[in-house]
Amino acid sequence: MATVLCVLYPDPVTGYPPKYARDSIPQLPTQYDGGQGLPSPEAIDFKPGALLGCVSGELGLREYLESQGHKLIVTSDKDGEDSEFEKYLPESDVVISQPFWPAYLSADRIAKAPKLKLALTAGIGSDHTDLDAAMKAGITVAEVTYSNSISVAEHAVMQILNLVRNFVPSHEWAVNGGWNIADCVSRAYDVEGFDVGIIAAGRIGRALAKRLKPFGVHLHYFDTHRLPEEVENELGMTFHDSVENLAENVDIISVHSPLVPATYHLFDEKLINSMRRGSYIVNTARAEIMVRDDVVKALESGQLAGYAGDVWYPQPPAVDHPWRTMPNNAMTPHVSGTTLSAQARYAAGTREVLEDFFASRPLRDEYKIVDGGKLAGTGAASYSTDGNSSPGSTGN
Ligand code: NAD
């Protein structure tokens, strides 16, 4: 019997289950763009479209796990030494967490988890786990690669349009009874004709490019791995050999790289000031790719015309986190990858990984980040070999 410790975000304040806006979600093809198959567990015990990512949703895992004789503990209490997470960590064989409400798995916490064999991200991005410490402890780290990539790409498109068209302030004028068109439009532009820079042309970056191309923008990108020429041509993307070169040649940057040592605090005052005055940054990758207060300063000075994204550090951020109130921001909580549509995929993928793990079958290569004491699968392709840059803090 294994103990599975699952950290999920709290239930809606209005109660669970919510009153759903729709009765169903669309059936997608069985393959993602590029050929990777969608999650394929032997069975699921939930209705696609249900709210699964919060505590009462339990990722739809309880029936399955308990029928196999395993113990499932679900909590949202994840930070600090007195948390439920730390209480159950010593007995846990598997930890499941989502980046939206990350259970920071630091080296200290890994040292308190002698039985831990699998740290599974229900979603994408395992930087909340100290990957070096996981490698040393022989823990497998896995995530449900591709499960919410399109969800994030759609959010990035929305946030680019949101900033450039000055949507949030215009909406507020309408809600508050005004009709002040001049105030709304004095910061509004068309995206058509803009230079858009994409940092990292991975699954999300390429999906964003594909969706932005019909807007008539000029697409640029930087990635440590250059795309094949035919893909660059198909997407109409110009490659830059450094972030610095990209930054000074675009009006909008959308960030889609993992948080690794090379991207930690990449966007500091110097890089932001090298951009065209009035540039926009959208960051749905990880907050620590930015120097927090340098973003605030650039918005206050007007060097940046807008900043949007859904990633913060730590998560949840303090009520007085400056990104909540900085000028011209269109921030959301970390929601882009946890639409009800995405949840159906990553809950199914989580179940698939658990079925393989408990049957001692190898995990799908694309789901692996760390395996056998080293980076593996997607981890070997997308993360750097010098480990993990997340401090893996307790989030306080
Ligand atoms: P992916 O593995 O498909 O692509 C990552 C890309 O980053 C690869 O092309 C890789 O070559 C590139 N890369 C690695 N190091 C780099 C560096 N130093 N500079 C530039 N490029 C670099 O991953 P993906 O599915 O596209 O996801 C990307 C990131 O987005 C994840 O690591 C995660 O942090 C974030 N994400 C956020 C959400 C959300 O809800 N906001 C959801 C999913 C993923």
Image (cartoon, rainbow, N blue to C red):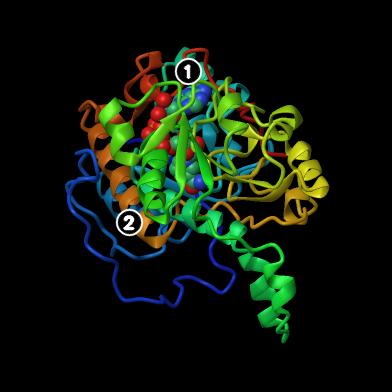
Indicate left or right for 207 with 297 as reference: left
Which quadrant holds residue 95? top left
Residue found 23% across the figure and 38% down from its top: 34
The residue tagged 1 is: 384
- Give the class, few, some or many, for how many residues have Cα within 10 Å of label 1's Cα (few <14, many ≥20): some
Q: What is the quadrant of residue 303 in the picture?
A: top right
Looking at the rendered image, the quarter that the N terminus falls into is top left
Residue at the spot of label 2: 344
Tell me if label 1 and label 2 are in contact, CB under 8 Å. Answer: no
In the figure, is residue 301 to the left or right of 235? right
Identify which amino acid the numbered label 2 is placed on: Ala
Q: Does residue 7 appear in the picture of this structure?
A: no
Please identify, in this view, whether the residue under mark 1 or under mark 2 is nearer the observer: 1
The kind of residue on which mark 1 rests is Ser
Q: Does the closest atom of ligand 1 sit within 8 Å of the Cβ of label 1?
A: yes
Viewed as shown, does residue 354 lie left or right of 263?
Answer: left
Q: Earlier in the sequence, mark 1 or mark 2?
A: 2
Tell me how many marks there are. 2
Residue 280 spot, x, y in % from top left: 63, 47
Given residues 287 and 317, the one toward you in this image is 287
Q: Where is residue 226 in the image (x, y as percent from the top left)?
A: 38, 23
